[in-house]
Image (cartoon, rainbow, N blue to C red):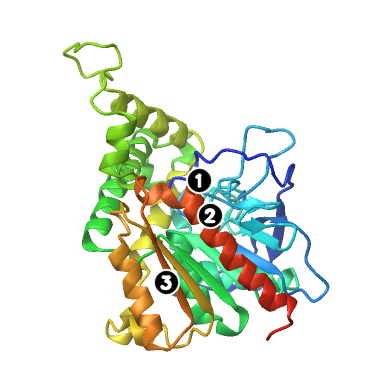
Amino acid sequence: MDATEATSAPASVGVVIPQRAAFREPLPLKCGRAIANYELAYETYGTLNAARSNAVLVCHALNASHHAAGVYADEPSNVGWWDNMIGPDKPLDTNRFFVVGVNNLGGCHGSTGPLSINPDTGAPWGAAFPLVTVEDWVSAQARLADHLGIQKFAAVMGGSLGAMQCLQWAIAYPQRTRYALVIACAPNLSAQNIAFNEVARQAILTDPDFHGGDYYAQGVQPRRGLRVARMVGHITYLSDDEMANKFGRTLKHGRVNYSFDTEFEIESYLRYQADKFSGYFDANTYLRITKALDYFDPAFDHAGDLTKALAPATAGFLVVSFTTDWRFSPERSREIVHALLKNKRDVTYAEIDAPHGHDAFLLDDARYHKLVAAYFDRVFDVIAGGAA
């Protein structure tokens, strides 16, 4: 889920320009409300072919955005969160594919969300912004596809929460999803995962600066709560081995100071990540995204039967898991694979032996990237051949 540490590779898409699409037709939400007059921030890389058949949608995870690749002219250090995956001659090759990244509704990176002005009040939405779900995000993404003139995606791709969106695309829009790359995913959150999210939310909700979600008017932000939420989340993204290799029990000053200041390197790292995160992410957005994670469960309306839930999907699937990912373990990915196989769907499954934990989907791993590149070779061959 941590999308802040990707580094730029030599073959980059270069300078990119974020765009916005405005929508006036109300979008019905799963919570029973609707939202009108909203915008979605997005970026594109590569060129859409004449047949409009080479588009790939990249869905982002918790703290990421539409900025998946390249850099901004005025922010050369702001590298897209999946820049090592997307670009010329990279696994998702922009010489061949037209890639679309979108900031989800309710986000804080340009799409309409709690920070945005509510046209009915003239003030920020704040606590009044509705709770949105994975299903709502996919519905909004489909409208963006219409806006871009894309009837069918060659592939929909994502990791973690982004992969849940891929599953929803395959279920809700089978006729618009040719392939789905579902990476580091689970068909729903375990009780332990929901518990981690609740601890993070409580840190924000009980921050004195939260003000019931309407902290904008107070000129403050619940940064203390957001910092704790970030630290809790970040711990779950790394494996124990990765933490041991990176930090071990190394003391920052080489000695024990018998204080509550940062003494161990791991403490210093977590505080640094928390400070950075709380400086750019909105707490109301964080609350809503973690709830969207909790709520996602396509089998819920099918008495817990994932096979029935995935029955509408007709896409070809690449499902990838990582051995040390204890937050979305390989066993959870295999649940998806088994359900798809029961539906006689075309499925490729890979379990990558990687030490990094859940964050592995964001990092450089030659086997993982070679696998994704080979799968996109297959996707390109199919669309080049004009298959339906």
Which disc is residue 31 wearing? 3
Across and down, in percent, residue 89 comes to 69, 53
Residue topped by disc 1: 364
Q: Would you say 79 lies left or right of 236 here?
A: right
Choose the circle earlier in sequence order: 3 or 1: 3
Q: As shown in the figure, which amino acid type bears the numbered disc 1? A: Asp
Whether tag 2 and tag 1 are in contact, CB under 8 A, the answer is yes
Please give the label number shown on residue 369.
2
Position of 177 compared to 257: left or right? right
Q: Is residue 223 visible?
A: yes
25 w.r.t. 272: above or below: below
Q: Earlier in the sequence, mark 3 or mark 2?
A: 3
Name the element at disc 3: loop
Q: Earlier in the sequence, mark 2 or mark 1?
A: 1
Q: CA distance from mark 2 to mark 1?
A: 7 Å
The percent position of residue 384, horizontal first and vertical second, equals: 74, 76
Question: Do residues under tags 3 and 1 come within 8 Å of each other at their CB atoms?
Answer: no
